[in-house]
Amino acid sequence: MSEQTFRMNRYVRHGRLLVGSVAAVGFVAKMVLAARTRGPADVYFFWAFAQHIEKVGPVRIYAHPMPRLPVYNHPPLAGWMLLGLDRLSRLGVEFGTLIRTPACLADFAAALLVFEIVRRRRSVRTAVACGIGVTLSPVLIPASGYHGNTDSVAVTLALAAAWLLADRRKPVAAGVVAALSISVKFVPVVALPVLVVAAWRGGRREFTRFSAALGAVLLVVWGPVLATVPGALRANVLEYKGGNFRLWGIVKFAEWLGFSNESIAVLRGPGHFVVVLVCVAAGVWPAWRRPDRAPLAVAITLGVLLLLSTASGVQYLAWPVAALFAIGFWEGLAYSVLAGVLASWVYTIQKPTRWTYDQQVLGAWAWAALLVGVVSGYAAVFRSRERGPDAPAPNPAATVPAPSVPLEVR
């Protein structure tokens, strides 16, 4: 090993340690927030769902009547998670704290994951800044430590699957993680075709191993529900369109521009499926052209998903945070500041589903920052041509860039 390689590997180890240390502090801070706050209505809803799951199980819960509760729209693995957390709560830990733990853990993992993704494509210093940016994001602090839905868990797993596939060349692990991501929350399903395309471009062996692992886990997790209550699963999960609120993005813009209620209903109805197809296409194209940059293609997909989302929810603001920091520091920072102020502001009012006009305007600025980040993501995919579209991702044990690479935050 050359002296340059040794020194650069030392930089990577030190950077990883720094990001991990800050992420650990961030995790503890979020857990303190979770333990000292009641959280939004979703915390109660999750607790109520867990009580019903105790009665009928995680499979039949989809066909089980639950008066005065929202539609149970969570994929099968979420039911098993709720069952496990409810039983853990019997040991003396508040369920309200436990339900926010997975999201806080996901943020910890996301910071390290973003560091690993960025340091292979940019400087180590930039990777450190991006990893710490995830931890300190003012979006994720309230979204995970206060709200604690499963959004952060799902998107982190989707990014991890892309990293395992493209950077680590572990298609079996990538297939398993990809299946888990859509089994926690269905949102990352738009990234699944991106991963399939990247695996296909990696060769027949890689595609076969990825597909086999993906299919096996989906069969185990989804199979019992599909065999028992397929209609209820389809209606509650697969066809769920999100809350019927007009707070964010293209639906809000359509309302401001004077579109009729009928037009907006079409946008949220049949138009919803068009949006999904656009999100898939947005990530499949860069994944086909540059399969070695599948993590960035997945990041773009997650960004476009929120950019074009016809549903609104303050917790949805967490979807692209790690993705944007994987694209670049300034992209992640700009969105995090605007969306973070919005999230903190909204969470201080009594009902997070009712945004004031000023909050909606701030949301429009956050939407614009997200748009800029997505465009920058495309530029990042095609910025460098050091490896052609058919070239495999570098071996993880290969030499990292020499210290002569500029280390400034870009």
Image (spheres, rainbow, N blue to C red):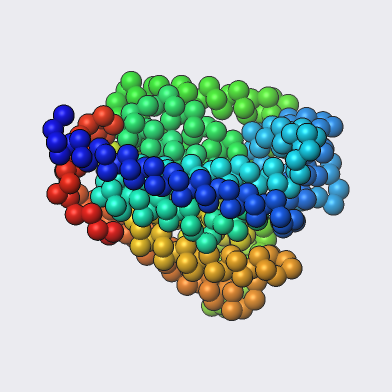
Q: Is residue 253 left or right of residue 328?
A: right
- In the image, 299 versus 255, the foreground residue is 299
As rendered, which of 108 and 381 lies closer to the eye?
A: 108
212 with respect to 95 (left or right) = left
Q: Relative to residue 37, is residue 297 depicted above or below?
A: above
| Residue 406 image point, x, y percent | 19, 54
- Image quarter hosting the C terminus: bottom left
Up-down: is 123 above or below 314?
Answer: above
Q: Is residue 141 in view?
A: yes
Give the image quarter of residue 298. top left
Q: Residue at x 49, y 32 (%)?
A: 177
Rendered residue at 26%/39% (across/down): 10
Query: Can you see residue 61?
Result: no
* Percent of width and height locating residue 261: 65, 70
Position of 86 with respect to 293 (left or right) is: right
* Picture coordinates of residue 198, whole percent (x, y): 34, 35
Residue 7's place in the image compared with 405, above or below, is: above
